[in-house]
Amino acid sequence: MTLLRCRGRAGGSSPPRPITSPPHRPTAMVEFAPDLLHVPCGANDIVRRRPDFGEIERTLRRMYDLATGTGALLTTFTLGRAYVVPVFPDWPERIAAVNEIVRGLASECGAVVVDMWDHPVNDRDNLLSADRLHFSASGQAVMAAEVVKKLAASLGHIASA
């Protein structure tokens, strides 16, 4: 949300408007009219005993449809292959499935995708935090740099990311 709160400050334009409805209401996002909006990748839904990938896609599609309606430039990321959850022997397949959903929806909506699945950062020993589910500060820094590169490329400031 920090990026969204900066709306309107660049170039001497007007200050950001306050959000008039609670943040959990979809209308708040539309009313806020962000220039840049990050759409989540559905990661929490794959830790269910039996994930329903159809429902994950439908839920993400509703989020993407709403986000696209704001006119903002959308960003998202895919999950890295470094994550391993031993209790789920099909964990790599779960990640691959949700990543494909994200890539497909992002493509349909013109979202900027930071694809972390095959990124070299996955080979770092210190990539994951102590919970073994989230990137460490080092991993977050790499992902942030990739977001900046992808945004710059999408705005035509560099040839490619």
Image (spheres, rainbow, N blue to C red):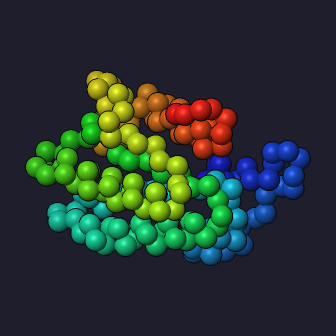
Is residue 7 visible to us here?
A: yes
Name which residue lies at 41% across and 32% down. Answer: 139
Q: Residue furthest front?
A: 159
* Residue 69, quarter of picture: bottom right
Name which residue lies at 68% across and 59% down. Answer: 34
Q: Is residue 32 left or right of residue 108?
A: right
Q: Residue 153: x percent and y percent?
A: 59, 38
For this rendering, which residue is in front, 148 or 27? 148
Please, is residue 69 above or below residue 99 in the view?
A: below
Q: Residue furthest top?
A: 125
Name which residue lies at 27% across and 36% down. Answer: 82
Q: Is residue 75 left or right of residue 40?
A: right
Q: How many numbered marks does the figure carry?
A: 0
Is residue 131 visible to us here?
A: no
Name which residue lies at 62% across and 32% down. Answer: 158
Q: Residue 159: x percent and y percent?
A: 59, 32
Please, is residue 109 above or below residue 5 in the view?
A: below
Q: Is residue 72 left or right of residue 121?
A: right
For this rendering, which residue is in front, 105 or 48? 105
* Residue 26, quarter of picture: bottom right
For this rendering, which residue is in front, 15 or 11? 11
Q: Residue 67: x percent and y percent?
A: 56, 66
Q: Is residue 54 left or right of residue 26?
A: left
